[in-house]
Amino acid sequence: MSARILVVEDEEALTTLLRYNLDAEGYDVETVARGDDAEVHLKERVPDLIVLDWMLPGLSGIELCRRLRARPETRNVPIIMLTARGEESERVRGLATGADDYVVKPFSVPEFLARVKSLLRRSNPERLATVLAYGDIELDRDRRRVARSGRPIDLGPTEYRLLEFFLEHPGRVFSREQLLDGVWGRDIYIDERTVDVHIGRLRKLLNSGTEVDPIRTVRGAGYALDDRFAKAE
Ligand code: CA
């Protein structure tokens, strides 16, 4: 599954350039031109990385960054801030608290792409790993095998993908809609209750006897791979 990047930028030419190059790198790119629209968008879907322009109509990049850092769902999403020359300096450093990196326009595309890559790797090394392990659960992507405490578990394709998705983001809470997007793909229309059915199946297959349920139901929010689970092992 390719990483999702949201580009929030009001300069059309730059948006086109970034989209083209990020696309070519295999990322799943979405673009928004206004700060307030980006905020609405981010309440529905959380990407793996945000490229955020400093000066935006509707809501400034800095203010959006501050709000994103205040929300648990977006607190840890890496943010690269784009600034125009002249906006840089200490002001940017001071105010852009919460951004993980910042790039001054005009910038070199290869350098920008290198920063995106390194930030994604830093924030989510699981995405690139062949074997995902959490607590006593192990998922081997090359062999497409799952085991719990060494006991092989035979999962259906959807349950496998669901577990893989959780293992890529341990601890993070996903709404049913986000799980549909991430596991089934965003172009497919499926009732959100389908998610509950597959979570139920996954639980049944994963948990044997007195084993601790690794999937946490968050009332009114969705599901997460319980971060207390790995620590309890
Ligand atoms: Ca701008």
Image (spheres, helix red, strand yellow):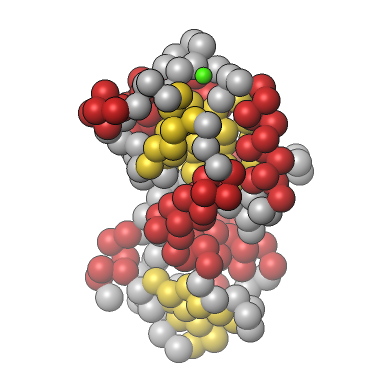
Residue drawn where x is 38% and y is 21% of the image: 86
Residue drawn where x is 51% and y is 53% of the image: 114
Closer to the camera in the image, 78 or 149: 78
| 30 left or right, relative to 207 | right
Residue 152 visible from this viewpoint: yes
Residue drawn where x is 38% and y is 78% of the image: 136
Closer to the camera in the image, 171 or 213: 171
Vertical side of 1 occupied by 129: above or below: below
Q: Position of residue 69 (x, y in %)?
A: 32, 33
Q: Position of residue 54 (x, y in %)?
A: 43, 23
Specify the quadrant of the image occupied by residue 77: top left
For the view shown, which residue lies furthest in the right direction?
188
Residue 71 visible from this viewpoint: no
Q: Position of residue 124 (x, y in %)?
A: 44, 58
Closer to the camera in the image, 50 or 116: 116
Number of numbered discs overlaid on the protein picture: 0
Vertical side of 165 occupied by 195: above or below: above
For the view shown, which residue lies furthest in the bottom direction?
150
**Quarter that holds the N terminus:** bottom right
Q: Position of residue 48 (x, y in %)?
A: 51, 47
Residue drawn where x is 71% and y is 40% of the image: 20
**Quarter that holds the C terminus:** bottom left
Vertical side of 45 occupied by 143: above or below: below
| 72 left or right, relative to 33 | left
